[in-house]
Amino acid sequence: MTKKILLLSFLGLAMGFGGQAQESISQPALAKELARMAHWDQIAAYIPQGPYKEWSKKKWRTFKDSVFTTHHQRCDEIFVQYGYPGFDQVGKEGENNFWLMVQHSDHAPDFQQKILTAMKEEVDKKNANGRHFGLLQDRVNLNTGKSQVYGTQVTYNMKICQAYPKNLADSATVNQRRATVGLEPLEVYLNDMSSMHFEMNREYYEKKGVTEPTLYKIPSAKD
């Protein structure tokens, strides 16, 4: 399994990718456009694959910046015309694709915050994915110098291959907050991230003598 396939498989599991063949949506053309945009977003968001591996770092960075900037501008236009595109307009996959590109608009935190505010109304109406809201909320908070609410944005202890949250507020009650937006317990999420990170960097860790990721104990219902 390649690194890119592994990443996309995990994103599909953790972030709610889903087919929309059986869905009745009001904006099918927009859904198709978002799918095309998301294709390029996924290429730009991760490490270079295929012919892109031959590009210089400068050329790759220019490409990434161009994709994210162009998508930010187009998503802003879509938002002005349609509001936050929820399940009723573009289906679950289309909503996922729009959110994903907003998530990657870190160069425009004011834009991310604007979308987050509108997204909350759709989540409350069950017309958008609550998990996506939690992920974007944390992204916005970190991009504006605040603490995370749900602990979805992580970094890694490279000595033992273990994920941990960046700048998390009130860790004692984080799982209660995560449950309100449909997120699994933080320990489960971090273990998934650690396992994915290990597979992506197996050669590096094996050279260091690390043969598996370091995982957290999963809390029981009694904890």
Image (spheres, rainbow, N blue to C red):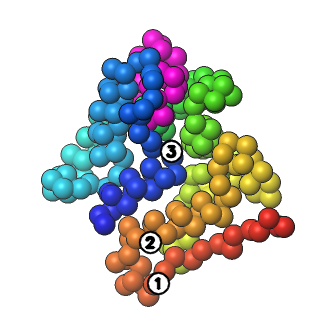
User: Residue 89 magenta-drawn?
Assistant: yes
Q: Main secondary structure of the magenta part?
A: helix
According to the image, label 3 marks what residue?
A: 16
Image vertical order of residue 110 relative to residue 217, above or below: above
Report how far apart the C-alphas of labels 2 and 1 lie in the structure. 9 Å
SS state under label 1: loop
According to the image, label 2 marks what residue?
A: 198
User: Disc 1 marks which amino acid?
Assistant: Val
* Residue at image location 82% in from the left, 67% down from the top: 223
Judge by depth and name the residue closer to the eye, 26 or 36. 26
**Numbered disc in front, either 1 or 3:** 3
Judge by depth and name the residue closer to the eye, 94 or 213. 94
User: Residue 153 magenta-drawn?
Assistant: no
- Most extreme residue toward the right is 222
- At label 3, counting other C-alpha atoms closer than 10 Å, the crowd grade (few under 14, some 14-19, many 20 or more) is some
**Image coords of residue 19 (percent x, y):** 41, 39
The segment highlighted magenta reads 71-93
Disc 2 to disc 1: CB gap under 8 Å: yes
**Numbered disc in front, either 2 or 3:** 3
* Residue at image location 29% in from the left, 46% down from the top: 43
User: Disc 2 marks which amino acid?
Assistant: Phe
SS state under label 2: helix
**Image coords of residue 138 (percent x, y):** 62, 43
Report how far apart the C-alphas of labels 2 and 3 lie in the structure. 22 Å
**Image coords of residue 212 (percent x, y):** 49, 80
According to the image, label 1 marks what residue?
A: 210
**Image coords of residue 181 (percent x, y):** 68, 42
Mark 1 or mark 3: whose residue is earlier in sequence: 3
